[in-house]
Structures are given as structure tokens and as C-alpha cells.
Image: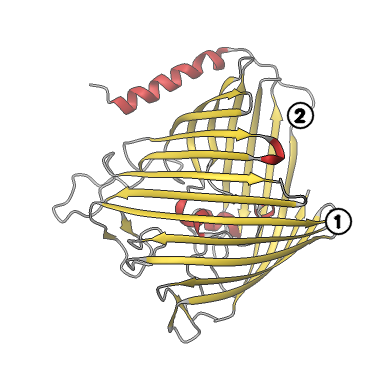
Amino acid sequence: MMSKRRGSILLTLGMLLPFVAQSTQVLADGPTINGYVDTQYGYNFDAPGNGTTFGRSYDAQDNNIANTAHLSISGMFNDNTNYVVDIDAGHDANTTVGGTNNASAVVLQEAYVNYVGASKLGFKVGKFATYQGIEVIETNANPTISRGYLFGMAEPFTHVGGVVTLALGKLDFAAGFVNGWDVANDNNPGKTFVGKIGLNLGDALAATLSGYHGPEQTQSAPLPANNVIDGNSGNNRDSIDLTILTKIIPSVDLFLQGNAGTEENAADTNGAVGGVVVDDRASWSGVGVQPVVHFGDKFSVGGRVEYFADPQGVRSGSGINNTYLTNFTFTPGYKINDNLLVRAEYRYDTSNKKVWVDDKGKAQDDASTGTVQFVVSF
């Protein structure tokens, strides 16, 4: 008997077929190409003995000069159909795929086709970025240089699959199925449901409510007697996120985010106790505020205040129960010209647990870092 989930996926694909069957004509003006080159230096003032700063994503390595190139190719087939191909190379790409410090990588970040019909009903299929969160993979589009806890611990980066879309005035909707969180090929038999509702009232308010539900653990069947992780479709991960942007205050972009998630039979795969299963269900939650204040066209100051609760120590990778993290970030930036952005950042992280280390390897309950960044856009 066909499962309900698989039947839903087939129904979604069936809804897409009438759109795909329509003929398209490639426009003669060709694709638009843009991107950036990012070079930055990051330093942890505690000079941690293990060379890394706990809780970070793209800037975890201490005392390091990182270099990343981003290339975006986009275009229109006709008035209804467009495509996007985004490629990352270098440091950030290597981090995205979980590589080592000395490795290099080229990553297909996004590659999708988007169709919108006359009725505003359409679809998006391929590989595309998450609907969740303030921060994105593209560094120059973020309020700060470093990424926060919610970006690195609570949200997927990208996924492969398809969604049906619908625009109704100031509202837009999307719903469909993907392989899972940050995997090109699915790592278990189940698919993950993704859905979002967007509201756009212009500068006054733009908000996105999004959610994910599905199994994300790697399949290992049959389930061993000692109850280590099994990636079957019963161990679901749920994530719900509300992200808001308002520009109601003159010269201020104010971003707000709240996120909460749970996972059945989750495990800490990164922390000191690595791979220990959390009985029943793990949970996590966090909130963040990120303002960007503009002083004319060239100078701006970005900031972040963020709190993340990780009761089982699973999403942070601390492996310590009741881990609660807070970070305060201050990021002034200056546009030397239309193509060159220079930013500096000071960030202070603190926790109720000693999750950072100093130069002697001694555990600490706080950390301070500084970063300088140069971004050339084209």
C-alpha cells in the first residue's frame, strides 16, 4: 500500500505537470551574471588552544584569513519562467559541506527553476535556500559578518525538492517536499515537508512564517537493540520560524526572529560526548534582533543580540544539558565605492556553561572575537 507521505509527493508532482507541459521560449538577452569575492580575517582574543571558536559556522577557525568567491547566474525563459544558479568556491563552500580547514571546495548552492502563471499559481523545483531566518549564506547580504546561533544551529541551509507557490495580493504561500536538511541525496526513506506564508506590506512590515517536518537522521536499519540513532521516517525533526523585517524607523532596517524545533531520538554528533542518543525528544529555541542603521549611502552599523536555548546540548554540539547561549555583535561598515565594502566586527559570546576554551585549553564561559572583512561585488 502506498504511504500517505509518498502519495502526497506524487500529488504535488502531478500538480506541477500542467505547468511543465507549457511551451517556453528562451529570451535573446541571455543570463545576468553577478557575485562577489570576500576576504576576511578573524581572531579570538582568548587564542583557543584547539584553534576553533565554539558555536560558530563560517568563522569558527581562529587566527585565519578566509577567502570565498560567489557567482550567481540568473535569467528569464519568458515572462513566467526564470532560473537561478548560484555557485560558491573557497572557504565558505568548504564549511558548507563540512570539510577540513586545509581543504577547498566548489559547491552548487542553488539551482532551480521558478514558474508563476497568470493566476499567480506556480512552482519552484531544484535546489534552493531555506525560507527560515534573517541571515543567509551570501555574506554581503547579512547585517553582520559572523552568523548567529539560529543560522548555524536551528535552520537548514539548503534543500533539494519542489514546492507549489501561490501569490494572493500581499500574501504568498509555498508548500512541498524536499530531500531534507543540507543533503543533495536523501539519507533516509522519508521526505521532509516544507511550507511558508509570507506577508509583504512594504517598508512597514515584511514577515515570513515557515516550517519543516520530516526525518533528517541517516538510515541505519534494522534498529539496534541498544537504541542508537535510526534514520527511519519515525524520527522526525520539526522546525518553525518567524522572521520579520520592518523599516518603519527612518534609516533603520530592523530584523526580528523567533525559532523553535524538536527532534525524536536526536543525538549530539559534534560535542564532547559525541553520538549519545537523547531519549524520546530533544528541543531547542531561540530569538534574535538584528538592526542595521544607515548613515547616508556609505556608512552603516549592523548589530545582533541573540539568545539560544539548547536543553539537551544537541543542536549546539556542547553535549551538556541545559546549555544557554547569548551573543552581542557590533559591525560597522563603509562602502568605499559601489563595488567595495569594508566591515569590522566585535562579538562577545557568553553561556551558563563553559563551552569555550582559552590558550591553555581551560574551559571558559565566554569568548570575544574580532573580524575584518573586504567584499568586492560585481
| Nearest to the observer: residue 337 or residue 222 | 337
Q: Residue at x 63, y 24 (%)?
A: 169
Above or below — where is 222 with respect to 102? above
Residue 137 visible (yes or no): no
Residue 229 placement (x, y as % from top left): 26, 52
The 10 Å Cα crowd at callout 2, few under 14, some 14 to 19, many 20 or more, is few
Give the residue type at disc 2: Gly
Q: Residue at x 64, y 15 (%)?
A: 118
Residue 231: quadrant of the picture? top left
Q: Is residue 243 left or right of residue 223?
A: right
Residue that lies at the very extreme toward the left in this rendered image: 225
Q: Which quadrant of the figure contains the N terminus? A: top left
Residue annotated with mark 2: 30
* Total numbered circles: 2
Give the residue type at disc 1: Asn
Marks 1/2: CA–CA distance:
28 Å
| Nearest to the observer: residue 254 or residue 327 | 254
Q: Is residue 13 left or right of residue 28?
A: left
| Nearest to the observer: residue 265 or residue 68 | 265
Going from N to C along the chain, the mark reached first, 1 or 2, is 2
* Disc 2, SS: loop
* Disc 1, SS: loop
Residue 94 visible (yes or no): yes
Q: Residue at x 47, y 29 (%)?
A: 175
Above or below — where is 135 with respect to 309? above
The circle drawn on residue 337 is 1
Residue 355: quadrant of the picture? bottom left
Residue 211 placement (x, y as % from top left): 45, 39
Above or below — where is 256 with respect to 52? above
Residue that lies at the very extreme toward the bottom in this rendered image: 360
Residue that lies at the very extreme toward the front in this rendered image: 249
